[in-house]
Image: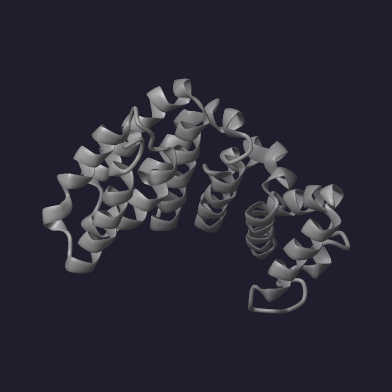
């Protein structure tokens, strides 16, 4: 068992709190101070085996990632390994962290793409949502990654539940360019008939933006 440190004592569970505010405040403090030592301690807490502490720690870490992704980017491999956890909170929390890391360190994530894909294929709704962001950021990084990962996104849009199409299309949009837009447009257009009016409206707004690329 990892010894609790002063940083870990600020977690919600250590304070006897049932809300996430202490964890968010700790993430904000870590970002303000660029406290890499604190992040290291939080990472150890995530791996401690204490479920309550681990759940608080992953919350802190992905909140840090959403604010300052470079502060957690060196730990991509730790988050990828956590995708195999039996603790679903760690799984979707780690994928959330990876979605932030993918904006600054896509190489580390691409190197372990099979594990990311397995977590996506077997994951909860939140895990899948964030994995789509991870895949889109990887595609955006360079042509090599795009060649291997973009087909995953197309297959997803063609096969996911109708209610997921608008949100996931918006997540994928960041990696669309003049070279791949027609394939993505075609995939989206095949789903329009299945969507509700509000869902269709959101997708049509995406399509309008896509069709304007390099036009």
Q: Percent from the top left, x then y, of residue 185?
A: 24, 41
Question: Splitting the image into 4 quarters, where does residue 29 fall?
Answer: bottom right
Residue ranking furthest to the top: 144
Looking at the image, residue 2 lies above or below residue 79: below
Is residue 11 among the parts visible in the rendering? yes
Residue most extreme to the left: 193
- 200 and 210: which one is in front? 210
* Location of residue 133 with respect to 20 vertically, above or below: above
Q: Give the image quarter of residue 56.
A: bottom right
Q: Position of residue 156 (x, y in %)?
A: 29, 42
The residue at 33%/49% (across/down) is 209
Count of numbered circles on the image = 0
Q: Position of residue 24 (x, y in %)?
A: 69, 68
Q: Quadrant of the C terminus?
A: top left
Of residues 13 and 22, the one drawn nearer to the viewer in this rendering = 22
Residue 74: image quadrant is: top right
125 sits left or right of 1 in the view: left
């Amino acid at each position: 068992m990892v010894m609790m440190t002063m940083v870990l004592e600020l977690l919600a569970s250590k304070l006897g709190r049932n809300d996430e505010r202490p964890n968010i405040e700790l993430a904000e403090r870590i970002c303000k101070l660029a406290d890499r030592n604190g992040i290291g301690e939080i990472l150890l807490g995530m791996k401690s085996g204490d479920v309550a502490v681990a759940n608080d720690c992953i919350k802190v870490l992905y909140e840090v990632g959403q604010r300052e992704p470079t502060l957690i980017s060196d730990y991509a491999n730790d988050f990828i390994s956590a995708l195999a956890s039996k603790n679903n909170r760690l799984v979707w929390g780690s994928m959330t962290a990876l979605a932030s890391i993918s904006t600054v360190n896509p190489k580390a994530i691409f190197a372990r793409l099979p594990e990311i894909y397995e977590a996506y294929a077997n994951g909860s709704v939140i895990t899948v949502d964030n994995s789509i962001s991870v895949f889109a950021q990887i595609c955006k990084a360079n042509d090599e990654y795009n060649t291997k990962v973009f087909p995953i996104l197309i297959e997803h849009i063609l096969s996911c539940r109708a209610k997921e199409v608008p949100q996931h299309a918006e997540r994928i949009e960041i990696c669309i360019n003049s070279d791949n837009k027609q394939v993505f447009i075609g995939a989206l257009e095949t789903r329009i008939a299945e969507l509700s009016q509000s869902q269709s409206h959101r997708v049509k707004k995406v399509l309008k933006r896509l069709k304007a690329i390099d036009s």
